[in-house]
Amino acid sequence: MKAALVRLMAGIWTVGLLTIVSTGVVAQSDTASQATSDELSTLHNRIEGNIADAKKLEKLVDEAKGDIRTMLEHRFEDKQFQIVDNVNALSVKIVEQEAAGNDMAQMRKIATDYLQRLMPAFRRQVEQQNKIMIDLISAKPPEDLRATISSEIAMNKAVTDLVGWYSAYHDSSMHLQTFGIDAATDKEYLTTKLPRLAELLADTITLTTEEIADTRLLLTLMPEDADFKTRLKLIDLRRDGAVANLSAVADLLEKLDIDSADYTSLVLRVSGDVSTGLLETGVWASLLQQWGENTWNWTTENSLDWILKLIILFIVLYAARALSRVTRRVVEQGIERVNLSQLLRRMIVATAANGVFVIGVLIALSQLGISVGPLLAGLGIAGIIIGFALQDTLSNFASGMMILIYRPYDVGDLIDAGGEFGTVTDMNLVSTVILTIDNQKLVLPNNLIWGGIIRNITAEKTRRVDMTFGISYDDDIPKAVRILEDILATNEKVLEEPEPDVKLHTLGESSVDFVVRPWVRTDDYWNVYWDVTREVKMRFDAEGISIPFPQRDVHIYRADTEAPRTVSRRDVASNPVDSKSHGPDIEEAES
C-alpha cells in the first residue's frame, strides 16, 4: 500500500502538477498575482521533494532489517503524512484563490483527480492501521517491564496514527466536496468508523481512570514501591494518549454533524482532574480512621454495657471454637469411607472447621458494633497486596491445588520427585514433607515437585522385580533354568499371577545371562530381591553351576621355547619383575 501511495503521488505530481505549475501558473499570470504563483511553486517543490524522499526511503525500507527497518518505516510514514498535508494545503490555496476571483479551473481539475485517486489509498491505510491497533489490543500482555513500556508506546502510536489518517481522510474528502465532487461514500465510511473508535477511546479512558485510582490507593499503603510507581506512570501514559486522541476524534465527529457532547465532556472532565480528586483519597487510611472513631465513640457512649458485651464476645468465640471442633470431627467421620487423598481430606476438614470459626468471629465482632463490611473490604485490599508480595508462595499454592486434583501421590507413598527420593510423611497446599531412606526429613515446595517428573514407586499394589544372573558357557542351561524356576516357586512372597519370567537374555563376553522377573506385592519388593539373590548363589554353588567373572590371562613367550606360559592375574601381581622383564614379548588376553 505504501509503495502504491508513493507511485500514485509520483505519477500525478510529476506528470500533472509539474506541467500545471510550470505552464498553467504562467498561463494564468494575467489573473493571479506573482505572490500566488510563488506560493503554488513552493508547494509544488515541497511535494516533489517529499515524493523523492519517499521513494528513497521506500527502497531503504525494502533493504533494511531489524531496528533500522523499523526506524525507516517510521520516517517513511512521516513522509506520507507530509505529502498528504501539502496536498490538502494546495487544495486550500486553490479554494482561497478561487474565492479571490482568480481562475483555477485547470489546477482544480488536477487536484480533484489527485484527491479522487487518493481516497482508496486513505481507506486502505485506515484499515491497515486499524488492524495494527486491534492486534496490539489482542496481544498477550508482556511479562517484563521493558516489554510493557514498548507495548504501551506502540499502542499509543498506532492509535495516534489511525486518528491522523482519519483526519487526513476527512480533510481530503471535504476538499473533494468543495470542488463539487460527490464524497458521500467517504463520508458514510467515516460516519461508520469514527464512532466506534470514539467508543473504544472512551472505554479506555474510563478503565484507565479506574486503574489509576486503584494504583494510587495501593501507593497510599506502599508509597515507596517502585513497581506501583512505574505502573502508575504507564497507565497515565495510556490515558493521556487516549484523551488526546478522543479530543481529535470528537472534533472530527462534530465536523461530520455527529453528536460528540458526551466524548467532549469526558475529555474535559478527565483532563481537568474533575473526577479523579476523590479517587486519589487514601481509602484504606479512611477505613482505619472510621473504624477507630466508631470504636472510640462506642466505648465512651456505651461504657455501662462494655463489660457485658465483652462477656458476650468471649462466649460467642468459645462457642464458635467448640462448634468448630465438633464440625471437624463430624466431617472427618463423614468422609472417612470416601476415596479421597489425605491432602483433600485435610483441606475439606480444615475448611469446614475454620469456616465455622470465622463465622463465629464475625458474629462476635458484630456484637461489639464493629462494621464487618469495611473490615472485609480492608482485608480484601490487604489480600491483593499480600498476593503481589507472595508470588512464589502463590505459585506453590497453585501447584498444591494441581497435586490435590490429580493425586499423583499421597501420604505414605514412596516417590522420586523434585530430585529427591523418599516416603511422603506430610503434605499441604504449599509443601510436601519427605522422609528419605537414611531417615532425613526434607521439605519440598510444591512448585518444585509439580514442575518436574513425579515417579510414584508404591502407587500400584504389585511390582515386578528385575534381576539378572549369569552362568558359565560350560554349564547346563536347562538345569540353570530349572533351579531358577524352583527358587521362585518355593518363595512364598512371589505371586503366581502374573506368572514370573525366567528367560535366557544375552550371551555376554564371559557369561550366559538370564533375566529373572517375578511379580510381588509392593511391600515385599526388596525382601524378594535380596532373598532370591541369596538363594541363587547358594543353589548354584550346591548344584555345581559357576558364576563367571572377568579374568585376565598373561601369555609369556621365552626365547628358549615356543610354547607360551599363561600366567593369571595373581601370578603377574606376585612376580612383577619377571613380567616386566619380558615386556615386548608379553601378550595379554581377557576371558
Image: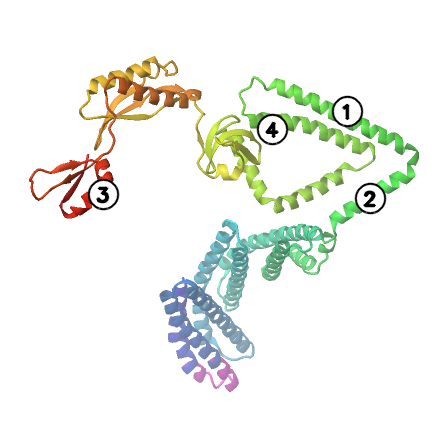
Looking at the rendering, the stretch of residues picked out in magenta corresponds to 23-40
Q: In the rendered image, which residue does mark 1 sit on?
A: 319
Q: Earlier in the sequence, mark 1 or mark 2?
A: 2
The amino acid type of the residue labelled 3 equals Pro
Element type where label 3 sits in the image: helix
Specify whether 331 is left or right of 82: right
Q: Earlier in the sequence, mark 4 or mark 1?
A: 1
Element type where label 4 sits in the image: helix
Eye-nearest disc, 1 or 2: 1
Specify whether 564 is left or right of 40: left
Q: How many marks?
A: 4
Q: Earlier in the sequence, mark 4 or mark 3?
A: 4
Q: Earlier in the sequence, mark 3 or mark 2?
A: 2
Q: In the rendered image, which residue does mark 4 sit on?
A: 347
Eye-nearest disc, 3 or 2: 3
Q: CA distance from mark 1 to mark 2?
A: 27 Å
Q: Earlier in the sequence, mark 3 or mark 1?
A: 1
Q: In the rendered image, which residue does mark 2 sit on?
A: 292
